[in-house]
Image: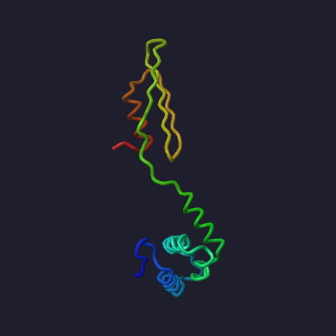
Amino acid sequence: MTRTKDSGIPDVSEVRSRFEKWRQTRQGKARIPDQLWSAAVAVARRDGVNRTAAALHLDGGKLKRRMAVADSRPLKSAPPAFVELVASAADGSPEYTIELEGRHGKLRIHSKGAAAADLAELSRALWGLAA
């Protein structure tokens, strides 16, 4: 497999041969596999969209859209490191609000009379962080 020395991005000729092999063996009008698109996007970032599209016999607009989608994907982030527990002592029974925010959305739990540890365990289970 031919690769540039410093970047680890496959050479356009290597990606072209992968596309040609796929085109010869595909069934009907099968879609281009994500692995081939990823290789094409990597080459296009280095060599340019038009040059890559021409070399790989791809639609330049589709390649450009694939690049935009790849650029917009969120990076994997660490789980939230801070959870604020707010207790209210108005009538003697504990009242808690737990708010979690992450890449999958937001979760808010409001409870009166439950123990904070129980709510924390519930939030982990609902959020998918329970061991």
Name which quarter of the figure residue 65 lies in: bottom right
Colour option used: rainbow
> Depth check: 32 or 15 in front?
15
> Relative to residue 53, is residue 130 drawn left or right?
left
Name which quarter of the figure residue 2 lies in: bottom left
In the image, residue 109 sits, relative to residue 35, either above or below, namely above
Q: Which residue lies furthest to the front in this view?
A: 6
Q: At 60% from the left edge and 71% from the top edge, which residue is drawn?
A: 63
Q: At 40% from the left edge and 76% from the top edge, which residue is drawn?
A: 5
Q: Position of residue 77 (x, y in %)?
A: 45, 49
Q: Position of residue 33 (x, y in %)?
A: 52, 73
Q: Where is residue 45 in the image (x, y as percent from the top left)?
A: 54, 70
Q: Position of residue 10 (x, y in %)?
A: 45, 76
Q: Residue furthest right?
A: 61
> Relative to residue 131, is residue 76 drawn left or right?
right
Quadrant location, the C terminus = top left
In the image, residue 5 sits, relative to residue 95, either above or below, namely below
> Depth check: 73 or 3 in front?
3
Number of labelled discs?
A: 0
Q: Residue furthest left?
A: 131
Q: Residue furthest bottom?
A: 24
Quadrant location, the N terminus = bottom left
In the image, residue 34 sits, relative to residue 90, either above or below, namely below
> Relative to residue 53, is residue 2 drawn left or right?
left
Q: At 36% from the left edge and 42% from the top edge, which residue is drawn?
A: 130
